[in-house]
Amino acid sequence: MVGKDPKRESYFPAIEKKYGKKMSYWFTVMKKVADKKYPEQMTYLQENFGFSRSHANALVMYSRGSLSARRFSNITEYYQDLPTQQAKTIRLILKTIREKYPDLQLVIAWNTPVLKLDQSYIFGVGALKNHILINPFTPEVIEFIRPKIGDLRVNKHTIAIPNDWEIDNKLLFTLVKARIAQVKNKLI
């Protein structure tokens, strides 16, 4: 979040400066993808214009009519906002990873649970309406483990899993291990 201002407009000066266009231009861009779902709009901005996740989120959510960002201050608040099955699955995913990798710190970033190692984001998880997204934060890690993903839907930065996913320890550990190796500048 920019400063302590929860308004999405607080991101607009930074968006104009970083991407070199006035907000009127970006609103026109958003009209072209107005019929798309949130993840598709996010991906469109990130892949076609190089938007950061936070800038894309501010523009997408503003364009969808959300003028302020409801922020979770801790993981308990996050779980309370989820349907029971999603909360159960996300809790189990994070617990499974943290048991194997106890040095990872659980934080709220981008308003979702994220595991960090020092200052690097290692693994994120987020709930959408009909599924959960897991995120090792780079497409290189996704490509590295693609042969092990099976029939899960793979996006550029995320993997979609069912809300009632049966935890695949091997897949989770491979994602996290590869991301940690990447962060530590080791080959994956």
Image (tube, rainbow, N blue to C red):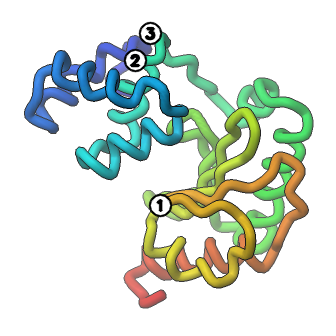
The residue under label 3 is which amino acid type? Leu
Q: Is residue 159 left or right of residue 179?
A: right
Q: Secondary structure at mark 2?
A: helix
- Crowd band around label 2 with a 10 angstrom C-alpha radius: few (<14), some (14–19), many (20+): some
Give the mark nearest the N terminus, 2 or 1. 2
At 71% from the left edge and 64% from the top edge, which residue is drawn?
A: 152
At 59% from the left edge and 63% from the top edge, which residue is drawn?
A: 154
Number of numbered discs on residues:
3
Taking depth in this image into account, of 56 and 76 the one nearest to the observer is 56
Give me the disc on residue 63: 2
Taking depth in this image into account, of 120 and 83 the one nearest to the observer is 83
Instruction: Measuring from the top left, give residue 156's x and y in whole percent.
Output: 47, 61
Above or below, 57 against 172 in this view is above
Residue 34 position by quadrant: top left
Q: Is residue 122 left or right of residue 187?
A: right
Q: Secondary structure at mark 3?
A: loop
Residue 26 position by quadrant: top left
- The N terminus appears in which quarter of the rendering? top left
Q: How far separated are the C-alphas under marks 2 and 1?
A: 23 Å
Q: How far separated are the C-alphas under marks 1 and 3?
A: 28 Å
The residue under label 2 is which amino acid type? Ser
- Crowd band around label 3 with a 10 angstrom C-alpha radius: few (<14), some (14–19), many (20+): some
Instruction: Measuring from the top left, give residue 99's x and y in whole percent.
Output: 81, 68
Q: How far separated are the C-alphas under marks 3 and 2?
A: 9 Å
Residue 80 position by quadrant: top right
At 67% from the left edge and 32% from the top edge, which residue is drawn?
A: 74
